[in-house]
Image (tube, grey):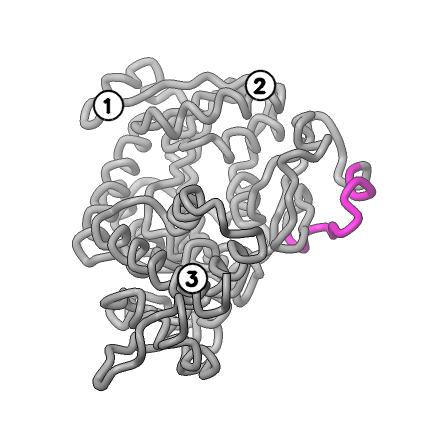
Amino acid sequence: MTPAARLQAAIEVLDEVISSARDGGPPADSIVTRYFKHRRYAGSKDRRAVRELVFRAIRQSAERPESGRAAVLGLAADEPQLLELFGQARGPDRLGDHEQVAAAGLVPERLESELPLFVQESEWPALLERAPLDLRINIARTMRDELLSQFPQGKPTPLSPWGIRLPSDSRVDDHPEFEAGLVEIQDEGSQLVALACEAKDGERILDLCAGAGGKALALAAAAPGAAILATDSNRARLSKLAPRRERAGAAIETRLLSPPGELDQLADWREAADLVLVDAPCSGSGTWRRNPEGRWRLTPQRLDRLIAAQKHLLDIAAETVRPGGRLVYAVCSLLSREGAGQMKGFLERHSSWISEEAPIAGGRSDGVGRLLTPGHDQTDGFFVARLRRPC
């Protein structure tokens, strides 16, 4: 493909990404993969170049552009050499008068007031920088020092004692240690959420929003003798835990829940859990460096629905924690309403509960919890708080 043809391909992919972000469709990575599945003539260098163009354009604009062409023209404001490709053979149509140009930005304007005051504007660029690849060692079966030599480019993560950090373009899915279940891909921020739980052998642990089970696996590694139940309302997500569980050698039970009857389906866990982890569905604003088009998907209506779901899940969790037990709440979000705001509301509804300091390195105090940010902690953005039910 010529440079002009690559730019035209990026515009076509961006059109699909913009439409998918508007309509709740698949993520950009999937769209890029699907686009080239039907264009076998494109070589690996072509695919890589188009993908980089697409994601540079996505990172450039905080608001969803009108079109892929507008997104690329926004990118050309900082890369003027791209303008020379318009009108070339197999490239985008020649430039016209009064073309739409996507405005540059990092945080959607409507969300700026949602960020805590201490997340200064100087930190915003880090929200969109490429993230490293973090691994979590399976501490039930190995030690970090034993594995570091197997990853020559790896370094210990600065905050988590379980982590190994690799360059962002690393691949480990065919690495012998990964296939043997000795490591899992998990951002250091997620590892710190699991560390905040302080899981212990013999405990009954409920992971209420387990998804594909990354944090449940971390809890099982930390406390192999715990009884862990991983639940979710999404069958496809929860089904991904089974092969990961087998690879890691972890004992984790799973249960599919059907809203709004979750409490009835958890009758055997009411007031019985030593620990409940609520890693709630959220805006994902803490993971924009991995999924920058997430900014284009987050409408005010969707944010309101997520906040309502978080409140619902917290109230379910409160019914399952035993007297004296603990609840850990986490969201991969930087928005105050999803983090400190949710905890404030929970403690107003459950005034006898006691907030505890989350026992993790890094982060900054935010209400009764701690907020990890890419700029300050070099992790994904996470809010984490720990509460205890009175005896």
The structure residue drawn at horizontal position 64% and vertical position 44%, both measured from the top left corner, is 171
Q: Position of residue 183 (x, y in %)?
A: 66, 34
- The three-letter amino acid code for the residue at tag 3 is Val
Q: Is residue 62 left or right of residue 224?
A: left
Quarter the C terminus occupies: top left
Between the residue at mark 2 and the residue at mark 1, the CA separation in whole angstroms equals 25 Å
The outermost residue toward the top is 268
Residue where numbered disc 1 is placed:
258
Q: Does the image show residue 162?
A: yes
Instruction: State the residue in front, 158 or 357.
Output: 158
- The three-letter amino acid code for the residue at tag 1 is Ser
The structure residue drawn at horizontal position 33% and vertical position 59%, both measured from the top left corner, is 12
Q: Where 142 falls versus 254 (above or below)?
A: below
Residue where numbered disc 2 is placed:
246
Magenta span includes 241? no
Between the residue at mark 2 and the residue at mark 3, the CA separation in whole angstroms equals 36 Å
Q: Position of residue 181 (x, y in %)?
A: 65, 27
Instruction: State the residue in front, 286 or 46.
Output: 46
Point out the tag, 2 or 3, that comes first from the N-terminus.
Answer: 3
Q: Which residues are magenta?
A: 147-159
Answer few, some or many: residues within 10 Å of disc 3's Cα (few below 14, many 20 plus, some between 14 and 19).
many
Looking at the image, is mark 1 or mark 3 nearer the viewer? Answer: 3
Instruction: State the residue in front, 139 or 370.
Output: 139
The structure residue drawn at horizontal position 40% and vertical position 26%, both measured from the top left corner, is 238
Quarter of the rendering containing residue 379: bottom right
Residue where numbered disc 3 is placed:
54
Point out the tag, 1 or 3, that comes first from the N-terminus.
Answer: 3
